Amino acid sequence: MKTIYFNCIKSFKYGEYSNILRIVSLLIIIFYPAYLQSQSIPNLEIFYRLSDSAAVNASKNIPAYKKSVKLDLNSGNTLSILNNQVLESFHNSGKNIINSSPNDTSAAEISFRIDKAVVDYGDLFQQKLFGDFYTERKITLSGNYILFLPGFSSHNFNYTYSDTVNANDIKNIENNAFPFTQSKLPSEPLFASIYEPVIAVGAAAITVILFFTIRSK
């Protein structure tokens, strides 16, 4: 038995083994999925960051001599979770947040409102053959604020964040407790669901044919 096995191995030439290894390596490159993907930032965290940007920019419009600020947050119940971030951002900008606006020239008043917080997912696509599906994520936060110094001025803001995320991560980056962090994901392309099985079967068949063709020489 050992003699037969040895003779079988000996009958192969080095070049034949090399050709088989090249074929197998090529198939691994084509079919091996990209498992090591960077973790996507949760949608709620991105809304926090955009809220911070809006609040920081608003605080810059308050004169430096206005050390105290009466902050009215009017974002409604749905987006009230973002109010804490806005409040923290104003505080971190060096302003003293007060509950009432005394007759004090050092105090300012600002009415801050977030009107829109939306997540959108683009059409699904693949970065490599037989790989995972990805989508372009676009998150938008917009609103306005009115600044009283005395006198008043109205300002609008609109911030957008976009990146590419793995479609398999959608359930992890959304938060069921906050519907504004969710959005409908488009369906997978019909063409991809048809040609991938065909290519997989064809590639496997070619590999078998090449293996026995080389073996028979």
Image: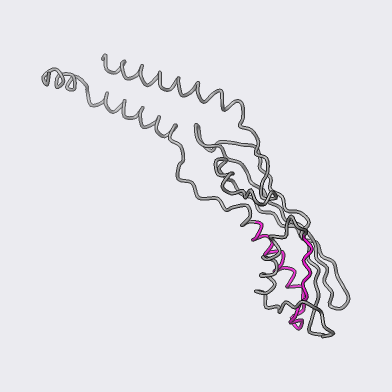
Using the rendered view, name the quadrant where residue 156 is placed.
bottom right
Question: Going by the image, does 176 lie left or right of 197?
Answer: right
Give yes or no for residue 54 being in the magenta stretch. Answer: yes
The percent coordinates of residue 25 (x first, y second) are: 36, 32
Residues 174 and 21: in front is: 174
* In the foreground, 93 or 81: 81
Extent of the magenta region? 47-75
Image quarter where the C terminus lies is top left
Q: Residue 157: image x %, image y %?
A: 77, 60
Residue 65 on image: x %, y %: 76, 83
Residue for point 61% across, 32% down? 188
Q: Is residue 42 above or below residue 105?
A: above
Residue lying at 65% horizontally and 37% vertically, measured from the top left:
123
Residue 104 placement, left or right of 27: right
Query: Is 112 covered by the magenta stretch?
Result: no
Image location (x, y in percent) of residue 75? 77, 60
The quadrant of the rendering that contains the N terminus is top left
Which residue of the protein is positioned furthest toward the right in this rendering? 151
